Image (tube, rainbow, N blue to C red):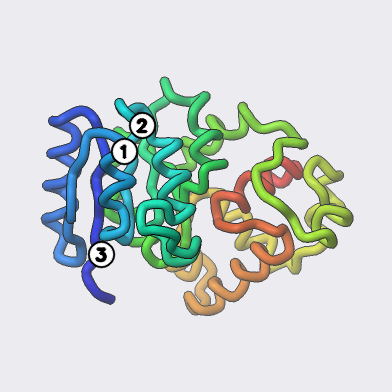
Amino acid sequence: MGVIRVLVAEDQALIRQSFAQLIDAHPQMKVIGAVSDGAEAVRLASGADVVVMDIRMPVMDGIEATRQIVRGESSGGATHASAPKVLVLTTFREENLVLGALEAGAAGFLLKDSDPRDLLSAIMRIHRGEGVIDPKVTPMVLRHVSPRTPLFEQPASASSAHGAGSDPTDAGSQFTPREQEILDLVCQGLSNDEIARRLVVATTTVKTHVKALLTKTGSRSRVDLVIWAAKNGLL
């Protein structure tokens, strides 16, 4: 794997510098920029693989910046798949804003006061396409999610047979025992490698099951998958 190019967007100078120094010290990461507002983040995002994004910033907030970056507006129309992944950093005081960042297309959520190792791990995981949601952030999101909140579109088969807010027994019946086991671990915030070690299986096996879970639930990411599980009473 090549060097991961990271853009840091944080309006508080000391925090921004701290994050940038931490990330730049990692041998597999390189900070390509450290900016103080969302508009600058959008302007520079096309050169990054991962954007570490604060929510509250001047000029343009992190939610709108995330939306534009995910849509490819930072690079003149890049596809969703090739757009940089966004890791949102939040605090308990910003609970009401987390859902907006989720709807904007953020690939992961982490508390600002998380262990530095968790931040580096989250960047690595998001770059691999896993998506990340800090277990401590999950309750914050769920308090603002109702069974009808349209966080993501589901295939007709998924929405009709196992729609949000359906009976937990019915919702879970589409999964094999192993898929249900892996879903539980994903909801606990474990990475593919951590799940593989826990279940004593190959990481490729875990990836196959996670892909099946995403397909069956109509989820775009692991973050969506956790929300789907919560809305269907499986947490």
Image position, residue 161 (x, y; %): 88, 56
Q: Of label 2 and label 3, which has the lower sequence position?
A: 3
Between the C-alphas of marks 3 and 1, the distance is: 22 Å
Task: Work out how far the residue at label 2 is from the one at label 1, CA to CA, in angstroms.
Answer: 5 Å
Q: Residue tagged by mark 2?
A: 60
Residue under label 3:
4
Q: Is 102 drawn above or below residue 97 in the view shown?
A: below
The disc labelled 2 sits on which kind of residue?
Met
Camera-side mark, 2 or 3: 2
Residue at 26% x, 60% y is: 47
Mark 3 neighbour density, 10 Å: few (under 14) some (14–19) many (20 or more):
many
Task: Give the vertical position of 198 relative to 56 (above or below).
Answer: below
- On the rendered structure, is 28 left or right of 89? left
Q: Is residue 194 in sight in this rendering?
A: no
Checking the image for residue 39, the label placed there is 1
- Looking at marks 2 and 1 on the same chain, the residue that comes earlier in the sequence is marked by 1
**Distance between mark 2 and mark 3 Cα atoms:** 25 Å
User: What's under tag 3, amino acid-wise?
Assistant: Ile
Between 189 and 37, the one nearer to me in the picture? 37
Is 22 placed above or below 100 here? Answer: below
Which residue lies at the image location 14% right of the left edge and 65% below the top edge? 27
Q: Is residue 36 above or below residue 82?
A: above
Quarter of the figure with the C terminus? top right
Left or right: 29 with respect to 153?
Answer: left
Would residue 156 be found to the left or right of residue 76 on screen?
right
Q: Earlier in the sequence, mark 3 or mark 1?
A: 3
Q: Measured from the top left, where is residue 3 in percent x and y?
A: 21, 69
Q: Nearer the viewer, mark 3 or mark 1?
A: 1
Label 1 element class: helix
x then y, percent, for residue 149: 71, 36
